[in-house]
Image: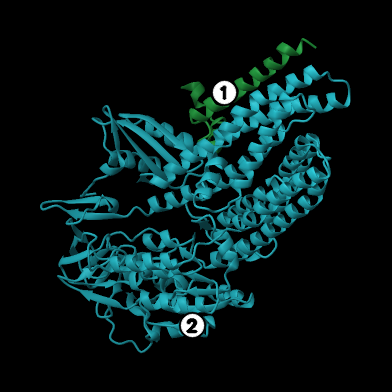
Amino acid sequence: MAEALDLSIYVRRDAGNAHMDLAVEGVGCAGCIRKIEQGLLQVPGIVDARLNFTNRRLSVDWREDALDAGDVIRALERIGYRAHPFAPDRAELDEAHHARWLMKCLAVAGFAAMNIMLLSVSVWSGNANDMSQETRDFFHWLSALVALPAVAYAGQPFFTSALRALRTRRLNMDVPISLGVLLALGMSIVETASHAQHAYYDSAVMLLFFLLCGRYLDHAMRRKTRAVAGNLAALKAEVAHRFDGSELTIVPVAMLRPGDRVLIKPGERVPADGTVISGDSEIDESLVTGETGRRSVSAGAAIHAGSVNYCGALTMRVAAAGAGTLLDEIERLLAKAQAGRSRYVRLADRAARLYAPMVHATAALTALGWLVAGASVHDAIVTAIAVLIITCPCALALAIPAVQVVASGALFRAGVMLNSGDALERLAEADTVIFDKTGTLTLPEPRVDNANAIAPDLLEMAARLALSSHHPLAAAVAREARDRTPFDGAIEEPGQGVRALVAGSEARLGSTAFCGLRTDPRAPHVPAASCIAFSYAGRTTLLAVRQKLRPDAVSVVATLKQRGFDVIILSGDRREAVEPVAATLGVRSWLAGLDPVEKIATIDLLKGQGRRILMVGDGLNDAPALAAAHVSLSPITATDLTQAQADAVFLGDRLQGVLAAVSISRRARRLMKQNLWLAVIYNAIAVPIAIAGYVTPLIAAVAMSGSSILVTLNALRGRDPAADVSLMRSAVATPPGLRTRSI
Amino acid sequence: MTVLLYLVPMALALGLAGLAAFLWALRSGQYEDMDGAALRVLSDDDVLG
C-alpha cells in the first residue's frame, strides 16, 4: 500500500498505551478466539487482545511507541482475518449502560422474590396449622425489610417511566404497575403493624421480577440487532483518499471535514457531498436520485455521497453542510414528513388507556360497595387494594413484550433488523406496499444481463480478466467469476479496457474497438444496458451490463399481491426504465420520474384514502418518503441517512425480507391480541373473587404466575417457523457477523 | 422457635452474598460475552502458558 492509512479517530490513547475496537470478519468457531488472541499477543508491542465472540468484536491494546493502528490490522491479516476499526456509537453505549442497569434491577428483584417467597410460604402453611402470631409478625417484618429496599431499587424503571407519562398527561402500562406495587406494599405494612394475617410483599416483588424479565429480554434482543448493524456498518469500511497539498492519505469517511480535498478514482464511491475541483467523468447517481442513466460532471459540478465515479479521476472539495445542497433539501423534507406523521400509540399503551381507568374504578366501587354493605372502613379498603393487586397488570404487561422478543428474534434470523420498537405493530397494519425501483426491486449493483446466452468458458474467462480492472462495468462482469484469482500480468489500459496473456493467446475485455469488434450483428438487444466486449483467440462476445431485478422480486411481489396487498412502484428513474420492470413484476400502478416532493405527495394522497403504507426504498431521495409512510423498510445497501429513517433494514440480495417482515409481524400481532384477550379472561375470573373478598396472598401469587406463564407460552408460538413463513427457509445468505444462534 | 432468630437472618445473609457475587460478576464484565465464555473453557492453552 503506497498511501498511508490514517485511523487515528478510532484509537484511544492513555498513558503511552493505545486502544482500538475492531469488527472482525469470519469469526466462526472456538479456534478463532485462540488463533486471534494468541497470534496478536505474539506481535511485539501488543499488550492485550480480547475477542468478544458474541458480537464478533476485538479490543486491542498496544504500546504506542512500538506500533500504529495499521500494523495491528496488518498483523490480523497475516493471521488470516480481515478486521475493520470501529467506534461504538452513542446509542449503542447508552443501550449497553441501560442493559446493565436492568440486569442489576432484575438481580435485586430476583433475590428479593426468592427470599420473600421463602418467608411467605412458611406463613401460608403456618396459617393453616398453628403458627403463633409473634412468629408470623416476625416473618412479615423480615419480608418488609427485604421488600422495601428491593422495590425502591428494582422498581425504578417502572416508576420513572410512569412519572414521565403522567407528566405529559398520558397513561401507559407503567402507571397501573407502579400504583399496584406501591399500594400492595403500603397496605402490607399497615396490616403487618396491626398484626393481621395477610400481607402482600411477595406479590409486589414477584410482579416486578416477572416484568423485569420481559423488559430485559426485549432490551437484549434490540441490543443484539444493533450490534450486528454496527458491525455491518464497520465492515463497509468506507475510506476516502484525502489529498493535503503534497501527499495522499487514506482516511475513514467519518474523518473527512468540510474543505478537505479528496481524490476519487474510477470505480469508487463519492465519499461525501461536495463540488468537483478538477477532472472530467461520468457518475452513476442511482443511489442518490434513483436515475440509472449516468451524468457527466466536470469542474464546478455538485456531486453527492453515494454516487459511483465511472471513467476519470476526479478531485473534489468536501462541502460544509450548508445551504443549497441536495442533502439539505432532503433533510428539510424529512423534518416536515416526520412532523406530519401522527404519533403512533402502541398496542400496549392503548390497552393501558382502557385498562387503567377501568381497574381503578372497579377498586373504588368495591370499596364503596363494601362500605354500603356495612363493612368497616379498614376491611373495605383492604378488599379494594386486593382487587388492585389481583388485577395487577402482570399478564397484560408481559403480553406484548413477550411476543415482541420472540418476533424480533424470528425477524433477525430471517435477516430483518428492526430499528424502532413499535415497527413490528405498524408493519402488521400495512395494506399497501410501495417499492422504489432502483436498488430496491433491482440489485444495488449492475450485473451481466445476458450471462445465460454466453458460452460458460468465455464468460468465466471474461470475469476473471475483469478482476484486474477498476472500471465499474468490469466490476459487474467480475461478479460472475467463480474462480476469484486474477490472471497474472493483466494490464489495464485506462479508458480502453484490460488485457492479459492466457495460455498463449491474448484475452481482451473493454470497449468494442479495443477488442477489435465493429458493430456486432449478434449484439444483444437489451435496452438501458451498457455493453462491454470480450475477445479471446478469435472468439468474441458482447456482455450487456445493466441493473437486474433481485432474484426473487417476481415471486415476492406475486405473493404480496396474493395476500391482498396493493403493490405500487414509485421511482425517480425515467419512464422507459420503469415500465419494463413494472411489466415483468405484473404491477399495474407505477409512477416514474418522481422527485422526493412528488413521492411524498403521492404517499400523502394514498394516506388520505385511509391506506396504511409500507414503503420500501434505498436511495437518498427515498428518505423523506420512508419517513412519511406508515412504516418503512430499506435494504442494507441503502444510504446511511435512508437506513436511519427506515423502521427496519433487511440483509442480502433477496427481497424475501419484505415478505418475512410482513408475515412475522402479522403473526406477532395476532399473538399479541390473543395474549391481551387471555389477560382479559384471567381478570374476568379473578376480579369477582377479589371483589367478594376471598383473595388471600396465596391465591394472588398463584393467579399472577399462572397468567404470566400462560401468556409467555402463547408468545413462544411465534417461534414456530413453519406457519406462513415457509418461504424464508431459502432466504438470505448469512452476512458476516450474523452467525448467531437464536435467543 | 427461637432458632429462627438466627437461622432466618443467616439465610438472608447467604442470599445477599449471592446477590453481591452476581453484581460483582456483572460489574467485572463477565456477562459481556456469553458465547465466548462457553467456548473459552474448551481451550487449554492457558494451562501451558
* A395 and A568: which is toward the camera: A395
Drawing shade for chain B: green
Could you say which quadrant of the image residue A641 lies in? bottom left
Give the residue at x 51% y 44%. Answer: A28
Residue farthest top in this picture: B2
Vertical position of residue A243 compared to residue A339: above or below:
above
Residues indicated by labels 2 and 1 sit on the same polypeptide chain:
no
In this rendering, position of residue A91 left or right of residue A606: left
Residue farthest right in this picture: A129
Give the residue at x 25% y 55%. Answer: A240
Residue A742, given in percent of the width and then of the height, sits at 60, 48
**In the rendered image, is residue A538 in sight?**
no
Amino acid of disc 1: Ala
Q: Which residue is mark 1?
A: B20
The chain letter for the residue carrying disc 2 is: A
Residue A327, given in percent of the width and then of the height, sits at 29, 66
* A435 and A691: which is toward the camera: A691
Give the residue at x 53% y 80%. Answer: A585
Task: Check disc 1 and report its element: helix, strand or loop.
Answer: helix
The chain letter for the residue carrying disc 1 is: B
In this rendering, position of residue B38 left or right of residue A275: right
Amino acid of disc 2: Ala
Q: Residues within 10 Å of mark 1 (few under 14, many from 20)?
A: some
* A692 and A541: which is toward the camera: A692
Task: Check disc 2 and report its element: helix, strand or loop.
Answer: helix
Give residue A582's mark.
2
> In 3D space, how far apart are the residues under numbered discs 2 and 1 (Cα atoms)?
63 Å
In this rendering, position of residue A299 left or right of residue B30: left
Residue farthest bottom in this picture: A521
Drawing shade for chain A: cyan
Marks 2 & 1, CB-CB < 8 Å contact = no
